[in-house]
Image (cartoon, coloured by chain):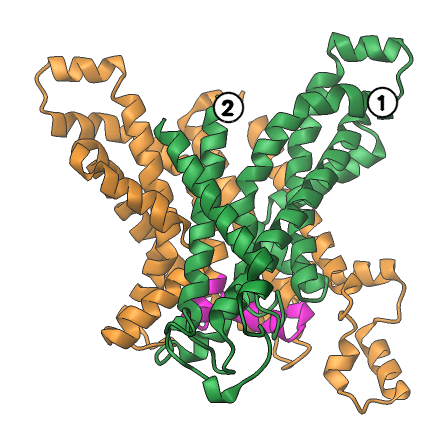
Amino acid sequence: MSFYFRKTGQYLLALFGVLTLSFFLVYKAPAGDPTKTMLGFQATEEDIRSLRRELGLDRPLIVQYAIYCKRLLTGHLGRSFISDFDIGRELARRFPLTLALAATATLIALVGGVLLGLLSVLYKKADPLVAFFAIGLGSVPVFYLGLLVVWFFGYKLNLFPISGYKGGMNVLPPALVLALHPMANVARITAVELDRILKQDYIRTAYAMGFPRRRVVGKFALKNALLSVVSSLSNGFAMLLSGTFFVEYIFGWPGVGLLAVDAMLNYDYPVIQSIVLLTAVSFILINLATDFLYALVDPRVRG
Amino acid sequence: MKKKGIRVIALAFLGLIGLLAVAIDRLSPYDPVRVDYEAALQPPSLKHPFGTDSFGRDLFTRAFYGARISLFGSALSLFASMVLGLALGGMAGLFRGRLLDVLFSFFILTIWSIPFIVAVLALTAAFGRGAFATFSALAVVNAVLIGRFVRGEVIALRERDFIRAARALGAGNGRILIKHILPNILPPVLVTTVLSFSIFIATEAGISFLGLGTQPPTPSWGSMIRDGLPYIGTAWWISFFPGLLLTLCVVSAGFLAESLGTGKE
């Protein structure tokens, strides 16, 4: 039991760190004084002073930090400096869209990656092809890849509307682009693990018992290889999260990533802060889940 | 043998790009930032191998001026992050359990719980924007990751006999760190650093692509790809060639690092 408590404590501490870091992100930022962006160039000294008082920016650092923590703990993310929308509500509206994109991409990456890995082990002829795919396409920066997809499939072949969320199958082009890096990763791990496992004794036993190769690889070996795929899930999720900023920007997908890019271009610090927090929380939760899942499957980890 | 071939090709390619980047102001008759609307949006030709952009600037010239920021900037900030990481991690390891180490470990834990690019993006936004902010953010985040590794290594080395012997002979912390610990941890740190090169290039390009990194009119590969975004249906070459160079460099740097990493084993 202590393993679970220790892990949870560690992640809570990390969360506190992110909280503090994102507070200083706003407090210390050179353009962090929001009054200039909010009031424009014609603002008088008096205007700026009263706005600073209103926002609590004239208080001492430690008081501002306490207020900030209390506000977050009661679930208030604040309002945008630029457009004055309620950040919590905006994120709640956009998060499902990002989640839909990420979930579709995860599915594509897992199924496609495992199939590719399996293919490269089962048919040696396909190996260079899979290697090219995994290393070659896996290293193309995701925003360049997205751009090429928009150009070729969107403009040249007119296969899908160029940008924006229009519901339904619209999720496929951005999800495919987003899935490529994690898919290459999964394919590589599956292939390497299968190669390693196929040298083990129980596989030889299975052959000796007369099972066909396809069955041995696809059933007995694959089951064990999938364990490593699961443990790489947190890494893959980080790739997905990073990719959403670029993919949403290119495809005009109105999720959290697009909001983040807009906020950064506008120096909208409360929004940036909230998105960093949201990303960190989801990342920490995924890591926690992976750790727990792994400990459940493999008791040695708990020790 | 095959590994060596890949390494030579990758190194030669990176060297060629670097050489062109250094020599581009001698080689090209065009200015990288001067606007010439008469020559706007020309497709690739002998006169303009990569075509021209919406301001009539020669993209070949801009691409290799851009290589200066992308390649040399990345290399420089990578080096800075290595030095910073060695210093921070070394100190934290040596003063294990003291306030400095506790603070640093807390910082490591924090950075570790945010995906790399999110941390870099957030820090870039905090530093303002532009190439310098981006490279500073990259250096800081990567230094923390290197520092984590260094701290662990120093803690393991600290109790070894040769360090204790040096201490018994009256060597101070600084001397121990530089003369005895550094030579032991430098090789793996160097390999990790080379491994990060492709990540630095790609991340800087990505942040510039989003509009937060290198600011116009200064060319960098990321900002050039961004320039082509509104013309993606009509003038594909604006984004295509900088992206191609970027991809080839990332792949080369990746192969180079991979061959180094496995060669060591």
Quarter of the rendering containing residue A83: bottom right
Q: Position of residue B105 (x, y in %)?
A: 72, 36
Say which residue appears at 52% left-offset and 83% top-offset: B55
Q: Which residues are magenta?
A: A245-271
Query: Which is nearer the N-term, disc 2 or disc 1?
Result: 1
Q: Position of residue B162 (x, y in %)?
A: 76, 9
Q: Colour of chain B?
A: green
Q: Chain of mark 1?
A: B
Q: What letter labels the chain drawn in orange?
A: A
Q: Position of residue A52 (x, y in %)?
A: 84, 77
Measure the C-alpha gap from mark 2 to mark 1: 28 Å
Task: Tell me the kind of residue under disc 1.
Answer: Arg
Give the crowd class for mark 1: few <14, some 14-19, many >=20 residues within 10 Å: some
Q: Which secondary structure dominates the residues rendered in magenta?
A: helix
Looking at the picture, tell me which residue is in the foreground, B102 or B240: B240
Does A178 sit left or right of B113 as displayed? left
Instruction: Please tell me the numbered disc located at residue B63.
Output: none
Q: Position of residue B222 (x, y in %)?
A: 52, 64
Q: Are discs 2 and 1 located on one and the same chain?
A: yes
Q: Which residue is mark 1?
A: B175
Does A253 sit left or right of A216 as displayed? right
Does A217 sit left or right of A177 as displayed? left
Mark 1: secondary structure: helix
Quadrant location of the N terminus of chain B in the rendered image: top left
Is residue A261 something one can see in this rendering?
yes
Task: Tell me the kind of residue under disc 2.
Answer: Lys
Instruction: Please tell me the numbered disc located at residue B264.
Output: 2
